[in-house]
Image (tube, rainbow, N blue to C red):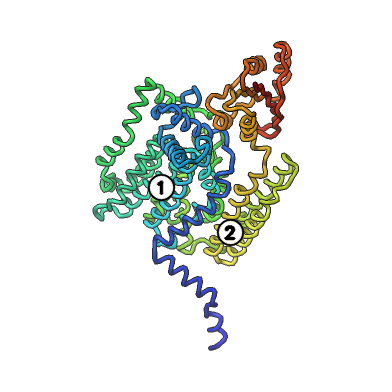
Amino acid sequence: MNVADAQLRPTRREAFASRAVVWFERSHARLCALLILLSLACFLPGFSTLQPMDRDEPRYAQASKQMLETGDFVDIRFQDEARHKKPVGIYWIQSGVVALGEHLGISDARTTIALYRLPSLAGALSAVLLTYWAALAFLGRRGAFLAASLMAASVILMVEARLAKTDAALLACCVAAMGGLARAYLSRGAGRLPLGTLAAFWLGFALGALIKGPLVLMFVGLAALVLSWRERSFRWLSVLKPWPGLLFTLVVVLPWFAAIAVKSHGEFFAASVGHDMLGKVGTAQKVHWAPPGFYLAAFFATFWPGAILAAIAVRFAWTNRRDDAVAFLLAWIVPAWLVFEAVPTKLPHYVMPLYPAIAILVVIAMARGFLGPHRPLARVSTFLIPFIPLGLTLGVSAVSWSFDETLPYRALPPLVLSTALAFYAWFLFVRARVVHSLLASLISAAFLALGVFGFAQLDLRSLKLSPRLAEVARNLGCADPAVATLGYREPSLVFLTGTKLEMLETGSEAAAFLKQGGCRIVFVDERFDEDFRAETERLGFEPALSTRVIGFNINSGRRVDIGAYSAVP
């Protein structure tokens, strides 16, 4: 054997890795098991220890909890306020999971936020597996695995998998529907679709409507319109069996929509369509305004580690836009993206259902040899791959030192390792080992999740205001105390202390609440302390200061100092 032959002969490690890859690729089940392991590594750290994240998450959880408390599974309420913004799907799923937890003997199930998050975890896992299934319409098993892995490791899905909201479940529904639509388009003229494909499309469509209203219709409808214009015909859609499918959708969604219309006297539709949906289109709600281009800027953080590769693949997408596969993915991405950029109300997770298409497009470009250091500016731009873990390592350390005067020592080892792996991913990319670079990025993402969600958030005690206040109330020394709050009005406090939490407006109301006697505690923000104490002095009693809770409210963006005043028989 000459020297050249020896250099070409694979090493024992490379030969083992090659055999392992071939073994996994022989079975969809094995690849899906790998995807589940990667997803759990990215989604589980901190899943049960992260506090309820204001403001949306505890609103969903509290409304689901009140369904169990009242037995009313039609109307959606947060305390006495009607919550007529989204359909009932996610509330039913959350309350069902919590009821099962109670049946299994989980203590304090109704205030255990992790139970309310399980539907989001299931939705995120389903979205990853459905991305694999959808990608099989465009790619082989290895390519489909890589596309689904990009979704599992994306920062935005890491976040949404841990929040008891609608977005992870909606993502799963959208991917199911778009995967079915892809098969209908790419196989047009080939006859019938398999029953499983039809089931995936219409289940995703119907459940998506029950979870978040018309958004699934928007994603599917825009793509179908663009592709039908391309084909100059709608006939290719007939293989989806539209009339039986629409009938099935009505059977799923119509009973509750009819029931809530009767119970709310039509107010649900006025609030959800007229105020919530059209309000986002016409004006930016609350503090969520952002200019056009916001999603493009946010994309490089939310779709890390795949965002830089997607940016390089843009030219590939334009050059190959007439290719059927690329045309479908662009029809999935571009029209909806433009709609979201045009709407004044913007939040990063709104465009998340477009990310599976981007992941598939990236892997197609990779499979066709387009991605690599030979592309203009690729060597320089991919240096941004380590930017997110490095930035989070520095940012988390700075926040921890600023708020709690300590460093997140438990989080630093996995964060530093994540950063090192991301630098190694860049090193591999510039040496044209693109797939290996992607795999290193995926491992980096798992360590990033462990560092940020598993450890760093545990040490950021200043951000855990509601759990600390709820703990003070639980340790009052009497059962079922009456609780009120003045100045601090976060929904997480309602979820953790109880539906009967009173939201007070003035120091006089707080003093009167405490004067009523019995077992009581009131939380008073320092801004109202002077008025509260003046009123208690006028009423002739001295409230007992149990403790002061000092921290930072991330929603108001200010430091807070809250006194816990109690009255115990």
Given residues 63 and 431, the one toward you in this image is 63
Of labels 1 and 2, the one closer to you: 1
Q: Is residue 243 above or below residue 419?
A: above
Return the residue nearer the eye: 393 or 81. 81
Tag on residue 378?
A: 2
Q: Position of residue 32 (x, y in %)?
A: 43, 58
| Residue for badge 1 | 175
Residue 13, numbered label? none
The answer to whether the residues at label 1 and label 2 have Cβ atoms under 8 Å apart is no
**Secondary structure of residue under mark 2:** helix
Circle 2 packing at 10 Å, graded few (<14), some (14-19), many (20+), is some
User: Residue at coordinates 35% horizontally, 30% vertically from top-left?
Assistant: 256
- Which of the two residues, 361 or 539, is positioned nearer the viewer here? 539
Q: Give the quarter of the image for residue 471.
A: top right
Q: Quadrant of residue 54?
A: top right
Residue 543 visible somewhere in the drawing: yes
Residue 139, placed above or below residue 485: below
Residue 381 versus residue 537 in the image, above or below: below
Amino acid at circle 2: Ala
> Which class describes the residues within 10 Å of circle 1: few (<14), some (14-19), or many (20+)?
many
Q: Position of residue 348 (x, y in %)?
A: 54, 41
Circle 1 — which element? helix
Can residue 364 be seen in the rendering of this structure?
Answer: no
Whichever of labels 1 and 2 marks the residue nearer the N terminus, that label is 1
Q: Amino acid at mark 1?
A: Val
Q: Position of residue 331 (x, y in %)?
A: 40, 47
Disc 1 from disc 2: Cα separation: 30 Å
In this rendering, would 393 be left or right of 143?
A: right
In the picture, the quarter occupied by the C terminus is top right
